[in-house]
Image: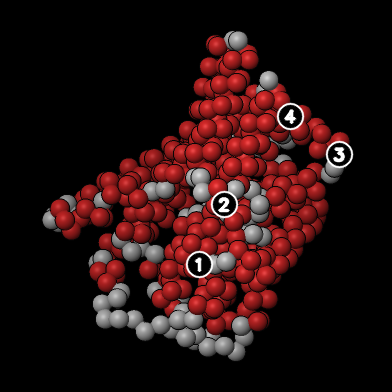
Amino acid sequence: MLTALVVVFVLAYAAIALEHPLKVNKSASALVGAGLLWTIYALSMGDAHAVSEQLGESVMSTAQIVFFLMGAMTIVEVVDAHNGFEVITSRIRTSKLSTLMWLVGFVTFFLSAILDNLTTTIVMISLMRKLLAKHEDRLFFAGIIVIAANSGGAWSPIGDVTTTMLWIGGQITSLAIIQGVLLPALTSMIVPLAITAYVLRGREVVTPQLAAGDDGRSATPDFERNLMFFLGLGILVAVPAFKTVTHLPPFMGIMFGLGILWLVGDLVHRHKEEHARRHLTLVHALTRIDLSSLVFFIGILLAVATLEHTHILTSLAQWLDRTVGRLDLIVMVIGIASAIVDNVPLVAASMGMYSLADYPPDHFLWEFMAYCAGTGGSILIIGSAAGVAAMGLEKIHFFWYVRKISGLALAGYFAGAGVYLLQYNLMH
């Protein structure tokens, strides 16, 4: 049975990693993998009651992550429908490319910590299209946006799916992850940003010529735009505080906030005609969220759960400890591997490999895992959702990214890892 489970999981994982060459959506591979793994496990065990109980536990932990992500995605879509992000992006103006690079890098870094790295990447690359006429300049900016978005997501409990998984799973707490990973994550962005800004020094910003009426999206009244922007971001930022005060799961906080946003939106738009308010409603926002990604998370987390229940992951952890020996090296290898394969199943597997009994909340393992898995995805453009989004929006070639950006991302990754290890040794 164990051999069959491992073979099926490896094949499903390979299909996920090779999503683009195979032209098969990774959500389909994850769901088929999860279905086969649980079927093999149920037929081999022979104890239907025990398997059903274990599946129930896995579904409950998976549902918490999916509900949280669904709520966060919907809030972001509502803010975007009201052009809320223009509150920030409209203030980014400069004539020097290097100065613009620094501004965009830091805005992306901190915005990603509040939203998520995928949404932030899409918002910032869309802004670059309005600010930069030259495609070559936009490519460099897209590369830095990917690095900054992934770095920004790593130090916040709500900034990256993998960090959110560790937070909801109880491996990290919100204040500790901010304190522990903020400086290393900032380093992992500043190193590539400084090199790129130096390369672009002295060059002027060439802005595209906009046609009349091109900027029609800013038709949303200032009051509505500002209200939905600050309310939406306020809800996202308040979720960690809600969890700390009430000790309820984070998904409860995000759903509560979603209800408040829905109520406020309906009250603000209640006097408008149906055709004018339809695209601003939360009902419309629910149709725009990335359900494919949510289905992928369900499939991969349930697939990994079978390996956890059969103790395959525990055995793998013990083998790594005997072979490699050093926890920091193991985590750094996992981080680099996340540039090639999706970091969600990597972190999900790591959560099953190492128990909270041996590695309690906020242990070195979990904090360093959040940093490495979050920032390691920047090394290749296919290593993160932010990278894949940038690839599609700006038509970035895989090998262009390898030649121009991968080395910068790798330098930032190792620099940030060095800062984390130094910081940890000094503080402990």
- Counting every numbered tag in the picture gives 4
Q: Quadrant of the N terminus?
A: top right
Local SS, label 3: helix
Is 272 placed left or right of 224 in the picture?
A: left
Residue 407 screen position, x and y as percent: 71, 67
Residue occupied by mark 1: 395
Cβ–Cβ under 8 Å for marks 1 and 2: no
In this view, the mark in front (2 or 3): 2
Q: CA distance from mark 1 to mark 4?
A: 41 Å
Residue occupied by mark 4: 314
Residue 412 screen position, x and y as percent: 70, 64
Q: CA distance from mark 3 to mark 1?
A: 41 Å
Q: CA distance from mark 3 to mark 4?
A: 14 Å
Q: Residue at x 50, y 28 (%)?
A: 60
Q: CA distance from mark 2 to mark 3?
A: 33 Å
What residue type is disc 2 on?
Pro
Cβ–Cβ under 8 Å for marks 1 and 4: no
Chain-order first, disc 4 or disc 2: 2
Local SS, label 4: helix
The image quadrant that residue 102 belongs to is bottom right
Local SS, label 1: loop
Cβ–Cβ under 8 Å for marks 4 and 2: no
The image quadrant that residue 225 belongs to is bottom left
Residue occupied by mark 3: 323
